[in-house]
Amino acid sequence: MEVPATTCRTGAHGTLPFIATICKVCKTGRNIPHSARWRGEDVLTPRVKLADVAKVVGVSTATVSRVVNGKPGVAEATRTAVLAGLETLGYRIDDPQGTHEGLIAVMVPELGNPTFGSFANELVIQLAAADRRMVLCTSGPGGTSEDQYLDLLAGVAVDGLISVSGTAADTLGTNDHYQRLLAGGMPTVFINAYDATIPGAFFNTSDAEAISQSVGHLRRYGHTRIGLALGQQRYLPAQRKAEAFLALGLPAESIVSTIFSIEGGQAAASRLLDAGHTAIVCGSDVMALGAIREVRSRGLEVPDDISIVGYDDSALMPFTSPALTTVRQPIAALCQAAVEALLSAMAGAPADPAEILFHPDLIIRRSTGPVHDR
Amino acid sequence: MEVPATTCRTGAHGTLPFIATICKVCKTGRNIPHSARWRGEDVLTPRVKLADVAKVVGVSTATVSRVVNGKPGVAEATRTAVLAGLETLGYRIDDPQGTHEGLIAVMVPELGNPTFGSFANELVIQLAAADRRMVLCTSGPGGTSEDQYLDLLAGVAVDGLISVSGTAADTLGTNDHYQRLLAGGMPTVFINAYDATIPGAFFNTSDAEAISQSVGHLRRYGHTRIGLALGQQRYLPAQRKAEAFLALGLPAESIVSTIFSIEGGQAAASRLLDAGHTAIVCGSDVMALGAIREVRSRGLEVPDDISIVGYDDSALMPFTSPALTTVRQPIAALCQAAVEALLSAMAGAPADPAEILFHPDLIIRRSTGPVHDR
DNA sequence: CTGAAAGCGCTTACAG
DNA sequence: CTGAAAGCGCTTACAG
């Protein structure tokens, strides 16, 4: 099998680094696509023509053409014979968009946070049940950006998009890519994001509810100096949690924004502990683990000295030390609603721009307890 | 924008459930692909023809054709003018394979196990550094099967494949799909799998080394009744760990195979504890957490009564109760080697079928301790 | 229902 | 280096 030259179609823009790459200058691929090779097509033997099939079956090319294109006015017997001929000769229909089975793309931030893995898992299952295939686009720091993925999707046969905690949750920055995709009619649905300028369907866990459950639980244990450790303030869930926190009569000084990671949780906890808080509500379970680490690094104990509440109820949280009290996102319900909305959008239903809030559940484990004055 | 009818091209096989689905009977899509809509093409206005461009630029269709196809023998000035004309009129080249930028597909089992999330994260980063885009195919129970994904890949523009702990690690069952892809020249690379009948490159963590480190550590603590809790025996890593275990002089009765999950770990531990073992080496961290749960459910403590060793050193294991002693897979090194091999295969380097073993590290935390006779 | 033939969009020797 | 013209594979009125 001959390896085709690795230049773009024009041949004018130098050699391309890899086979089947498109040329950055003219956006054109090579003449013989590399993918044709592993599809098992022999690029050297000419492909089957309509005329070949017509000759074998003993009909005109017109008739074969009609069958291939599903035009009416072909006797059933003839159609069957032609279909058989197409099959045996291996005639391939030229589909510029790439014939495919309604592939769904799912955008998720980095998979380091197990919650996003759970969303992905739940979505494959739900989509598989609807006989859909899903492909995951993970961005994450150091990886491919969400915008790069969205550009990519324009060149790949994708029929629907589910975005989980994506840039549409980022209150800074524009969502041009999503705007363009939606304007073009790409069925799209969002989980844990909201952008009023995007006419999409948004399915979110209620941050207000999560905060009120967490704070209520701590107050019942007698805590009054309650801190809130959040990730980047530019993300909507962080903003909403902060608002809900203030709405409960707690002071703005008790809110610390760092980043959504173990280190971020530890840093936020450090400042909140310095300020004399006896309980900390965290923006994610991962941050909560960082907060616990900070408490212990000071020779204190959770929950004897300090209570910690997480958010997400991600996998394995029952096994942490101590088992984490946290607010469970209703992942299955969220995914089910999102998939349903996506499928109906794909079926042509008119877009119904709205935000639907889902109620979380407080899962009480061992990281919270009665206040203990220090 | 008109929504096209949702029937296949032949129109003879009933209505398709969704727009842009292919017909199960004739494998044909509809006439107007749905994807054309969100790409912003107006399906109702005819597309730009070569002749249109020729007229505007003031050359013959032959010249435009030459430029589009990169044929030689066009004056540079003419070529530039034509390229400009193509651009302004928005002429689109019909690329049946879908022009794309060398997309890489990564197959991973379910993301419930954080280790697979870590592999995915590491691979996006490494591929992004090489200016490659990656798309994740998660199988997992209840989801889309690996074989379904592999079939799908034949219809999508994918230029390379990395399979992590896939069916090629399954010693039962055939790997026809991989065989076909590889035979067709699809650049493919495997992580944590091995199938001698596949002429691919395999990058694996040494199971023998992992077991010998774990057992050695426990023996140093005085344990002699050491059990091994594994997942399905059909998977190669389970088989290899069992072999290594026996090679260390430990009895076959001390090996229990269940499944790779918390429940599997718990069930295996239950049988091993009944048989009087004082330490259990597990096939994954997730199984180890199940084993710890079983120990505790019997009123015993880890590591005071029973020592537990995990495998993977997945995310968050330092935060479990107790922090898990485990064997760390060298994920970064494994991914780096796999990506390098894949890129060179994509660049046309001859396939180099071989298995390369990577050495793991024992991470000693708090779930292991001196033997304590019961 | 079917085919001969005209037509369409693109490519490619051939002539200059 | 460029265009007129023949050719290719497919589609589509039109005639029967």
Image: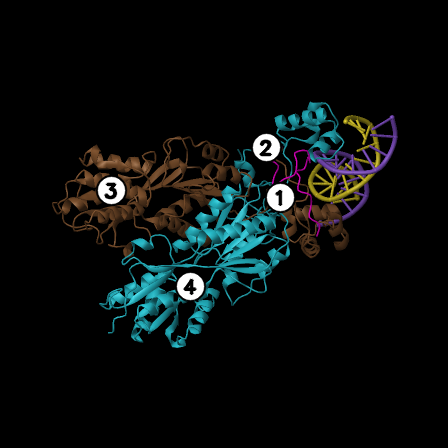
Chain colours: A brown, B cyan, C purple, D yellow
Q: Residues at badges 4 and 1 in contact (C-beta under 8 Å)? A: no
Magenta stretch, main secondary structure, is loop
Report how far apart the C-alphas of labels 4 and 2 lie in the structure: 63 Å
Residue at the far front in the pictured view: B220
Given the image, on which type of amino acid does mark 3 rest? Ala
Q: Residues at badges 3 and 2 in contact (C-beta under 8 Å)? A: no
Q: Which residue is mark 1?
A: A20
Residue at x 41% of width, y 33% of height: A199
Given the image, on which type of amino acid does mark 1 rest? Ala
Image coordinates of residue B215 in percent, x first then y, are: 37, 68
Per the rendered image, the range of residues in magenta is A1-25
Tag 3 secondary structure: helix
> In which quadrant of the rendered image does the C terminus of chain A lie?
top left
Given the image, on which type of amino acid does mark 2 rest? Leu
Q: Are marks 4 and 3 on the same chain?
A: no
Seen in the picture, residue A79 relative to A278 is either above or below; the reply is: below
Tag 2 secondary structure: loop
Q: Residues at badges 3 and 1 in contact (C-beta under 8 Å)? A: no
Whether residue B154 appears in this view of the structure is yes
Image coordinates of residue B343 in percent, x first then y, are: 57, 48
Report how far apart the C-alphas of labels 3 and 2 lie in the structure: 59 Å
Q: Residues at badges 4 and 2 in contact (C-beta under 8 Å)? A: no
Q: Along the line of sight, which residue is nearer the eye, B52 or A80?
A: B52
First reached walking from the N terminus: tag 4 or tag 2: 2
Q: Are marks 4 and 1 on the same chain?
A: no
Q: Residues at badges 2 and 1 in contact (C-beta under 8 Å)? A: no
Image coordinates of residue D11 in percent, x first then y, are: 69, 40
